[in-house]
Image (tube, rainbow, N blue to C red):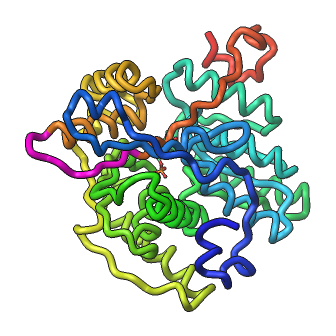
């Protein structure tokens, strides 16, 4: 039984759930970083290890999104993201496990080895892939593809928003708050004063803020923005938190309606750098440091930037807080880039990412 349903038993019968597994994700003391900073209370939450085939933060959202799709008899899911989207890959992977067809509506981004690996995984899991040159053309194309699928299959596909960040997806991170509360109660870590987590499409942060408060942990979420300000910001996050709160309250009145303020969430904009997926020097420095101190592998797009903010915070003189770094990246084994890399064998729209 998942921690959220354990406490709010009416939700169990009313909120569909598809088990992907690997929870609770472990918490660990960051011994190396503790040594470097002299603060013994630095921890990591290892969501990188969750999931059977692919990990990271999208798994928690997909347990509720795919559950919702299956419970409502959908046969096909469709979602959006950049060409090398971790969310698209996670959706392709676990839709195939759930025996749902999957269509990925992607838009162009500069290629990298991560983009290549994620695209290969999308192909391996038999998703249908469309890649548009820009976000705007992607939006228009999305409408057309939804219509085509609906006509052909006589049923609309289940639409998962980019990043899986709907109220339903965010419940995954409400549950994560309850999971952490259980780990604190079991003595696996002290109650953190602060949690550092990456802010993208916001479902992770919005759910976590709600889950922490509802489970009675008073703890501040430090959200490090890695997308443009109009995509993810404090006000939009709180709106998603409140909508998710209402959804849970409507399904189980025992789940309280809560209110949120600057004491619950702070959003940092100053680690974003020059744009989405453009590395920053301080992010790259932290990636190097934590890989040596604690053998933790982070990425340049999301967790490295968040790590840079976390590092500045914990090296601030006189700061003796207990601080938890939430690792949202997958560290499962990657598909080998050698095998299918005959570009001729790849769908035409995808070839350019491999040359
Ligand atoms: C998607 C993603 C995020 C951002 O999470 P959101 O819920 O979209 O804000 C953070 N880290 C990694 C590695 C991701 O793939």
Q: Quadrant of residue 259?
A: bottom left
Q: Residue at x 33, y 36 (%)?
A: 307
Taking 153 as reference, is 200 above or below it?
above
Taking 174 as reference, is 139 above or below it?
above
Can see residue 132? yes
| Relative depth, front residue between 54 and 202 | 54
How far across and how far down the image is residue 209, in percent? 40, 65
- The mark tally for this picture is 0
How far across and how far down the image is residue 26, in percent? 54, 45
How far across and how far down the image is residue 344, in percent? 78, 11
How far across and how far down the image is residue 200, in percent? 43, 48
| Relative depth, front residue between 139 and 60 | 60
Asked if residue 321 lies in the magenta stretch, the reply is yes
Q: Quadrant of residue 270?
A: top left
Taking 11 as reference, is 111 above or below it?
above
What residue occupies the far left of the structure in this picture?
A: 317
Q: Residue at x 81, y 70 (%)?
A: 71
What residue occupies the far bottom of the structure in this picture?
A: 253
Q: Residue at x 37, y 69 (%)?
A: 217
Q: Residue at x 57, y 35 (%)?
A: 330
Quadrant where the N terminus sits is bottom right
Instruction: State left or right for residue 347 relative to residue 212.
Output: right
Magenta: main secondary structure: loop
Give the extent of the magenta segment: 316-325
Can see residue 207? no
| Relative depth, front residue between 151 and 313 | 313
Asked if residue 256 lies in the magenta stretch, the reply is no
Quadrant where the C terminus sits is top right
Instruction: State left or right for residue 85 relative to residue 95.
Output: left
What residue occupies the far front of the structure in this picture?
A: 187
């Amino acid at each position: 039984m998942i921690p959220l349903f354990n406490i709010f038993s009416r939700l169990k019968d009313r909120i569909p759930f598809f088990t992907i597994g690997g929870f609770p994700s472990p918490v660990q003391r960051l011994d190396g970083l503790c040594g470097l900073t002299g603060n013994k209370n630095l921890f990591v939450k290892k969501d990188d290890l969750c999931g059977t085939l692919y990990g990271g933060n999208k798994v928690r959202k997909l347990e509720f999104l795919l559950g919702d799709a299956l419970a409502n008899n959908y046969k096909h899911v469709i979602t959006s993201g950049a060409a090398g989207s971790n969310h698209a890959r996670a959706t392709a992977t676990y839709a195939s496990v759930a025996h749902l067809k999957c269509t990925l509506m992607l838009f162009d981004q500069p290629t990298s080895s991560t983009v290549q690996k994620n695209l290969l995984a999308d192909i391996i899991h038999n998703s249908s892939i469309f890649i548009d040159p820009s976000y705007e053309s992607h939006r228009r194309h999305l409408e057309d593809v939804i219509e085509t699928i609906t006509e052909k299959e006589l049923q609309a596909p289940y639409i998962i928003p980019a990043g899986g960040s709907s109220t339903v997806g965010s419940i995954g991170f409400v549950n994560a708050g309850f999971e952490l509360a259980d780990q604190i109660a079991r003595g696996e870590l002290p109650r953190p004063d602060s949690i550092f987590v990456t802010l993208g499409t916001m479902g992770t942060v919005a759910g976590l803020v709600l889950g922490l408060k509802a489970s009675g942990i008073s703890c501040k979420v430090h959200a490090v923005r890695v997308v443009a300000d109009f995509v993810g910001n404090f006000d939009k996050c709180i709106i998603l938190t409140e909508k998710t709160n209402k959804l849970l309250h409507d399904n189980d009145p025992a789940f309280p309606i809560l209110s949120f303020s600057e004491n619950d969430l702070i959003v940092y904009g100053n680690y974003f750098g020059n744009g989405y997926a453009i590395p920053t020097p301080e992010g790259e420095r932290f990636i190097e440091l934590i890989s040596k101190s604690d053998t933790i592998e982070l990425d340049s797009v999301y967790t490295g930037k968040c790590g840079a903010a976390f590092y500045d915070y914990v090296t601030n003189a006189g700061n003796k807080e207990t601080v938890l770094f939430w690792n949202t990246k997958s560290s499962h084994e990657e598909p080998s880039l050698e095998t299918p890399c005959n570009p001729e064998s790849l769908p035409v729209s995808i070839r350019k990412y491999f040359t």
